Amino acid sequence: CYFINFDDLSRSHRCNPLDPASMEDITDASESARTILYGLNRSWQKKQGDFFVDSAINFVTAVIWYLRKYQNGVYCTLPHAIEFIQLEYDKLFSLLNMQEEVKSLVGVFIQAYQNGAVEQLEGQIASAKIALARLSSPQLYFVLSGDDFKLDINNPEHPKVLCLGNNPQKIETYGAVLSLYVNRLLKIINKKDKEKSMLVFDEFPTLTAEGVIPTISTGRSNKICVLLGVQSMEQL
């Protein structure tokens, strides 16, 4: 039985939602970047396809995947990604450009930087940097960088009960991080030959969990039951 509690670390375990072992390809990095940024900027969900929104997501995707590939993912955590993004552009782009798989994602940013289009570059990147900076706290960093357990709660060899705790006064911050946990968990557990499991989400509208819809649709065949708690149809 494991708990995630950002308010009381004495009652919390530690878990890295960007565990490199579960990040199989760059789409995992892209989904994680989208989840965390949508959670921090709820209005962005209505702006899918917007140039600056997509640019911010691509930028964070590149950073996460760079960390996943660097030294086999030893620094692939959200805290490391947040700190990495704060580097000066010269050093940041030089490092990102060394990873073949992210060159296509960072090429447009490097070109804008080399052409002196600083205002455009700031518009593309600053929104991501500002949003992620809100997660810069010792409590979040401590929990998000640990490895007390994996998110494969329905693993027949290591079944788990996992309780994620939110705080109504810090929903905008905690909700984004919990959404990342939930989306990564949904991706990991929806597989064949696992233990039967149940997912209970109280106050579900506080999460940005796009992965819950395909889980409801396809998870039944993998013995997954989903229960969503909402207060009204409008919230749903």
Image: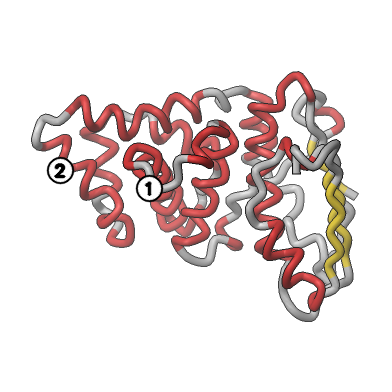
Residue on which disc 2 sits: 111
The spot of residue 10 in percent (x, y) is: 84, 28
Residue under the point 73% across and 56% down:
151
Q: How would you rate the neighbour count of disc 2 (Cα within 10 Å): few for under 14, some for 14-19, many for 20 or more?
A: few
Does residue 205 appear left or right of residue 119 in this picture?
right
How far apart are labels 2 and 1 at the CA level?
Answer: 15 Å
| Type of amino acid at the residue the image marks with label 2 | Gln
Give the mark nearer the N terminus: 2 vs 1.
1
Where residue 163 sits, quadrant-wise, is top right
Q: Given the current orientation, which residue lies at the most extreme top position?
A: 169
Looking at the image, which is closer to me, 65 or 184? 184
Q: Circle 1 sits in a helix, a strand or a loop, which is it?
A: helix
The spot of residue 56 in percent (x, y) is: 38, 39
Residue under the point 21% across and 46% down:
108
Q: Circle 2 sits in a helix, a strand or a loop, which is it?
A: helix
Residue 119 vs 45, above or below: the answer is: above
